Image (cartoon, rainbow, N blue to C red):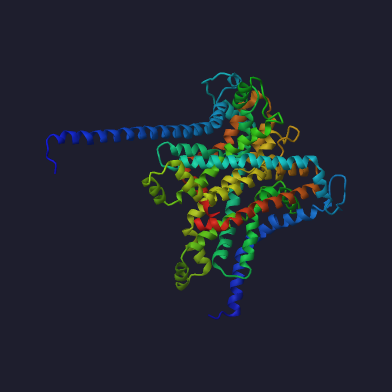
């Protein structure tokens, strides 16, 4: 079929015209800010410098020397390590439990999922209260276990653990949903064949459910790791990153550096680090993409 | 055939015995399975109960009279005082309206931009399509949430700080939505479009009359995910807005909680928390199948 030039031109114009509105907003609020951060990260721009001064990679060198940044960065890694595997495992077990349409399990599914519908900031309020010494339920529980009053959010040793538990509570039910979806796609005859052969429930899980929900696990893992870097709302209410930066996370530190310390050059450099991190994490998913499509 | 009457009873006895043995192992097997199931249910529902505790705690505090809130013991007293007090203590109604406006505004524009882009990516062959699609995926990898620092400056350059439009702007295009809808558009049979064209319908007409209605479930999914995201968003609206008039519920709640730090006011903070969380919770409880289904499909395809 021979298509004329005018037809081709019209089709191209039509395609670009349709994409254009979305593209404009993406350009303004994704591509341009990314570039802007990259450029600004090469300049010194803070309250002391009236005009931005080009410093090359100086800001990045400073980041490596900034003990707070290093602390925040390792905090974030630990936060991911502490929350992601736990959330995934819990989500998987929750899905196993809530998958069957047996009476009462709908209720269980509901109670696992509802934290996802509560704003992070409200979650922070709730848990701040639960952790308040003398009054809060969990604070009292901890005090009863250790036989002394404890301030879970006030001590550098316990603050991360306390926040991780909160995060797992908030997220596990959300990830359960994806496992539920994944489990529903596993052919029922596999389970029937296993049942006929008298294979035990644990073996079935190990040999059928886990391998066949691998694509889900990969997807959820990427979302969970990304969230570990993205969700920082709770810090504003609960700890402000304290005590002594023990609970501070990267994005919150960027926020602090920008709006409380007014150091734009450093904030830009940290934003670039953040972008690089996120790109690396999501490329993990693209490497596993083939397998995912295979099971769909 | 063995008709020896002497053998008969013996034979019977033997099979009876075997049956009894079978029954015995079967019964212990059954009991074992029953115990395992009970344990499994215990753990499952135990966890479910554990998961509800924080919410129950907040609800109890929100309806508990101030004077019994400090006491360590359980109290059955009930009051609406806290809710009324908090509702009048900060302009929560304004925050509520603002939140509805922002969620609605973002969703309305998103639906238009993503429908157009998804159709182009799914059904129109134009130069640079693959490259452009890759470029769109960047927003999924680097969401606007982490670009708060530079987006604030962009908004400043546009002179839109402290406006509701400013809160909404970065989210007007959603690559995630485009991705989701493109998948759905691609799955619709080609014949539909051809038939419409034979009838003389324009491409835009086909899009609005055939593609959009047939992808309704995807639109509902996206709408639920989008609204719940923006209802819950905090850091960005906090940065952008300064004046009380432009505050959203989450920001209003945070400011309110910060202004009341002593333990005596925990019932107020709980009441405020409940007010902010309630609208979405109620919606979720009424449409839970739909909501859970939406998050499910957004995951499989996304």
Q: Is residue A117 visible?
A: no
Position of B221 with respect to B245 (left or right) is left
The residue at 49%/49% (across/down) is A182
Could you say which quadrant of the image residue B124 lies in? Answer: bottom right
Q: Residue A43 at x, y = what percent? A: 83, 52
What count of labels does the image hold? Answer: 0
Q: Is residue B113 above or below residue B94?
A: below
In the depicted view, which residue is nearer to us: A234 or A83?
Answer: A83
The residue at 66%/57% (across/down) is A26
Could you say which quadrant of the image residue B134 lies in? Answer: bottom right
In the depicted view, which residue is nearer to us: B34 or B205?
Answer: B34
Position of A227 with respect to A58 (left or right) is left
In the depicted view, which residue is nearer to us: B265 or A26?
Answer: A26
Q: Is residue B253 visible?
A: yes
The residue at 63%/58% (across/down) is B137
Q: Residue B143 at x, y = what percent? A: 65, 51
Q: Residue A127 at x, y = what percent? A: 62, 32
Q: Residue A58 at x, y = what percent? A: 84, 50
Q: Is residue B124 above or below residue A261?
A: below
């Amino acid at each position: 079929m021979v298509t004329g030039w005018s037809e081709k031109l019209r089709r191209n114009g039509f395609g670009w015209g349709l994409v254009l509105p979305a593209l404009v907003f993406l350009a303004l609020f994704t591509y341009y800010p990314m570039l802007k951060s990259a450029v600004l990260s090469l300049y010194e721009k803070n309250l002391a410098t009236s005009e931005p001064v080009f410093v090359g990679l100086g800001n990045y060198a400073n980041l490596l020397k900034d003990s707070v940044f290093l602390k925040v960065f390792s905090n974030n890694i630990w936060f991911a390590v502490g929350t992601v595997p736990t959330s995934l495992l819990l989500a998987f077990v929750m899905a196993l439990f809530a998958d069957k349409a047996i009476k009462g399990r709908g209720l269980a599914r509901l109670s696992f999922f509802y934290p996802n519908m509560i704003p992070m900031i409200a979650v922070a309020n709730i848990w701040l209260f639960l952790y308040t010494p003398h009054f809060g339920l969990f604070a009292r529980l901890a005090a009863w276990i250790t036989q002394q009053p404890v301030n879970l959010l006030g001590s550098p040793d316990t603050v991360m653990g306390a926040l991780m538990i909160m995060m797992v509570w908030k997220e596990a039910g959300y990830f359960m949903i994806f496992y539920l979806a994944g489990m529903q796609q596993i052919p029922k005859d596999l389970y029937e064949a296993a049942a006929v052969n008298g294979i035990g429930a644990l073996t079935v899980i190990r040999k059928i459910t886990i391998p066949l929900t691998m694509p889900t696990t990969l997807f959820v893992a990427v979302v969970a790791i990304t969230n570990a870097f993205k969700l920082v709302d709770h810090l504003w209410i609960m700890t402000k990153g304290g005590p002594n930066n023990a609970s501070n996370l990267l994005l919150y530190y960027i926020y602090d550096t920008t709006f409380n310390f007014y150091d734009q050059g450093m904030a830009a450099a940290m934003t670039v680090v953040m972008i690089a991190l996120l790109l690396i994490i999501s490329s993990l998913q693209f490497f596993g993409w083939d397998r995912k499509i295979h099971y769909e | 055939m063995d008709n020896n009457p002497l053998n008969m009873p013996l034979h019977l006895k033997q099979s009876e015995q075997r049956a009894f043995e079978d029954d015995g192992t079967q019964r212990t097997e059954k009991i074992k399975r029953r115990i395992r199931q009970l344990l499994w249910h215990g753990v499952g529902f135990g966890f479910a109960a554990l998961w509800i505790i924080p919410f129950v705690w907040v609800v109890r505090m929100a309806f508990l009279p101030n004077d019994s809130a400090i006491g360590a013991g359980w109290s059955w007293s009930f009051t609406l005082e806290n809710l009324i007090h908090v509702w009048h203590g900060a302009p929560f109604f304004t925050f509520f309206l603002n939140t509805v406006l922002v969620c609605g505004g973002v969703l309305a524009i998103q639906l238009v931009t993503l429908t157009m882009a998804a159709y182009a990516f799914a059904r129109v062959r134009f130069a640079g399509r693959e490259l452009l699609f890759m470029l769109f995926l960047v927003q999924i990898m680097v969401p606007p949430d982490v670009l708060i620092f530079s987006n604030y400056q962009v908004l400043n350059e546009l002179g839109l700080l402290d406006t509701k439009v400013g809160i909404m702007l970065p989210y007007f295009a959603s690559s995630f939505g485009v991705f989701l809808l493109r998948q759905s558009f691609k799955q619709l049979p080609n014949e539909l479009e051809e038939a419409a064209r034979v009838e003389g319908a324009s491409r835009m007409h086909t899009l609005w009359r055939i593609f959009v209605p047939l992808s309704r479930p995807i639109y509902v999914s996206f709408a639920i995910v989008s609204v719940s995201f923006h209802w819950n968003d905090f850091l960005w609206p906090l940065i952008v807005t300064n004046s009380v008039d432009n505050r959203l519920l989450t920001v209003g709640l945070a400011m309110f909680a910060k202004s009341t730090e002593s333990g005596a006011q925990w019932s107020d903070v709980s009441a405020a928390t409940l007010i902010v969380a309630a609208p979405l919770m109620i919606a979720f409880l009424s449409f839970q199948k739909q909501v859970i289904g939406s998050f499910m499909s957004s995951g499989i395809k996304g």
